[in-house]
Amino acid sequence: MDHEYAEPLDVAALARTALMSSAHFSRRFRETYGETPYSYLMTRRIERATALLRRGDMSVTEACFAVGCTSLGSFSAKFTKIMGESPSAYRARDHRELELVPGCQVMVQTRPRKSPRRSSSFGEASATGAD
């Protein structure tokens, strides 16, 4: 999914590749990564879209389709939820401060952050014992 984020991937195809049923694949994926396969894919797509929008030579619509999204409305809503601002606002912002930073650091600094939904992705008991 990290390399083929722009392709129309679905859980059934991913599960077939992993030689699992769709339900088992989804459960194992969520246990391992702490989010659903769709959420993970969309986060990767938004991450790639931020890089395209920072360049400034691509419209929001072009970035949306370039990363594999087919609905501008859904893309904009997910982008806003993950990044905290609309894709248009992100594109319009001054990103010159990142020009002097090595690309690997830009990727780390601009990576979408999500608050964890669970205390552990491997099913251990939480420190508070509230699970």
Image: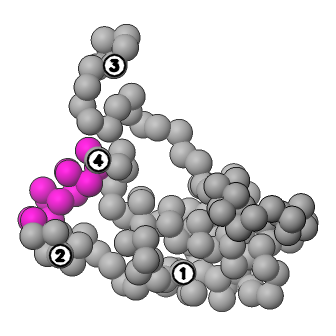
From mark 1 to mark 3, how far is it between C-alphas? 36 Å
The secondary structure making up most of the magenta span is helix
Q: Amino acid at mark 1?
A: Val
Residue 129 image-quadrant placement: top left
Q: Which mark is residue 115?
A: none
Circle 3 sits on which residue? 126
In the rendered image, residue 81, in percent from the top left (x then y), is placed at 60, 54
Mark before the other along the chain sequence, 2 or 3 = 2
From mark 2 to mark 3, how far is it between C-alphas? 33 Å
Observer-nearest residue: 17 or 99? 99
12 displayed left or right of 7: left
Q: Amino acid at mark 2?
A: Thr
SS category of the residue bearing label 3: loop
Q: Amino acid at mark 4?
A: Thr
Residue 10 image-quadrant placement: bottom left
Q: Are marks 1 and 3 in contact (CB under 8 Å)?
A: no
Circle 4 sits on which residue? 32
Q: How many marks?
A: 4
In the rendered image, residue 131, in percent from the top left (x then y), is placed at 28, 19
From mark 1 to mark 2, how far is it between C-alphas? 21 Å
Which residue is found at the position 41% from the left and 80% from the top?
4
Q: Is residue 116 above or below residue 11?
A: above
Magenta span: 20-31
Mark before the other along the chain sequence, 1 or 4 = 4
Residue 29 belongs to the span the image colors magenta: yes
Q: Which mark is residue 67?
A: 1
Residue 11 belongs to the span the image colors magenta: no
Q: Is residue 54 above or below residue 65?
A: above
